[in-house]
């Protein structure tokens, strides 16, 4: 049963912002890997839509909105086209990949949690789906480009933790009836900032004792 925690318009805006940010990160990584135009478009689409499609399938929102709303499908193609023609102006492509990935992570963890809550899910599984929405596309991007996913790489800065933080804030605010466009944006921003700080200062999750 669906309940309206945040309006569909706000949900769509959050989704499209996250899609665009993730599509840019996917397209930029494709350029770094020297993919052709088709590869750039494919990696942009998979990165942008992968996590949301998984979320929609789990909550029963089928067919996934990525296949029913042309805006969701076209936005990654726009991002791919921008990167295809504009990437020579980017002095450090890898840094841009990480920055856009952080923004996509922050927006999608909140958007995914909100959509799960709107479909009547308990806050805890809604948080889990928010994290899955945030990390799913990036994991698929890394696998397709033959990279070890940041989620699993032992030398990678914390990745799922910022997403879990943003999802937890969104679920907590919803439980307190304080979730609105402003607080949603704040929760997403906190997740983005934590991810960027992790990249800046090398914050990593602890390893099992004796494996350092």
Image: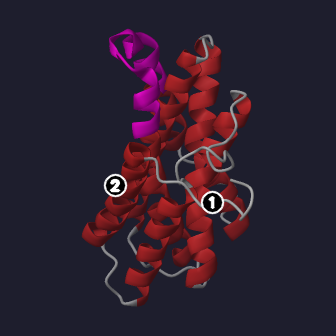
User: Furthest-front residue in view?
Assistant: 210
Asked if residue 85 lies in the magenta stretch, the reply is: yes
Q: Secondary structure at mark 1?
A: helix
Residue 77 to residue 186: above or below: above
Residue 97 to residue 56: above or below: above
Provide the major secondary structure of the magenta segment: helix
Q: Separation of disc 2 and disc 1 at Cα?
A: 19 Å
Relative placement, left or right, of 170 versus 156 is left
- Identify the magenta region: 80-99
What residue do we see at 43% from left, 55% from top? 106
Q: Which residue is mark 2?
A: 193
Q: Are there few (<14), some (14-19), or many (20+) residues within 10 Å of tag 2?
A: some
What residue do we see at 46% from left, 47% from top? 202
Disc on the earlier residue, 2 or 1:
1
Q: Nearer the viewer, mark 2 or mark 1?
A: 2
User: Does the rendering let one see residue 76?
Assistant: yes
Asked if residue 45 lies in the magenta stretch, the reply is: no
């Amino acid at each position: 049963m669906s309940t309206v925690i945040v309006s569909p318009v706000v949900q769509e805006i959050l989704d499209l912002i996250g899609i665009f940010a993730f599509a840019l990160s996917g397209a930029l990584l494709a350029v770094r890997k020297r993919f052709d135009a088709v590869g750039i478009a494919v990696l942009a689409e998979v990165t942008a839509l992968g996590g949301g499609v998984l979320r929609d399938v789990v909550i029963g929102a089928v067919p996934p909105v990525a296949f029913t709303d042309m805006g969701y499908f076209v936005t990654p193609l726009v991002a791919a086209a921008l990167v295809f023609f504009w990437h020579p102006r980017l002095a450090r492509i890898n840094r841009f990949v990480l920055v856009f990935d952080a923004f996509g992570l922050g927006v999608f963890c909140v958007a995914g949690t909100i959509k799960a809550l709107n479909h009547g899910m308990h806050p805890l599984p809604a948080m889990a789906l928010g994290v899955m929405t945030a990390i799913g596309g990036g994991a698929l991007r890394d696998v397709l480009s033959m990279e070890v996913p940041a989620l699993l790489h032992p030398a990678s800065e914390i990745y799922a933790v910022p997403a879990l933080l943003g999802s937890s804030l969104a679920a907590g605010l919803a439980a307190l009836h304080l979730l609105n466009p402003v607080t949603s944006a704040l929760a997403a921003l906190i997740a983005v900032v934590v991810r960027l700080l992790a990249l800046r200062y090398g914050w990593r999750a602890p390893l099992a004792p004796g494996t350092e």
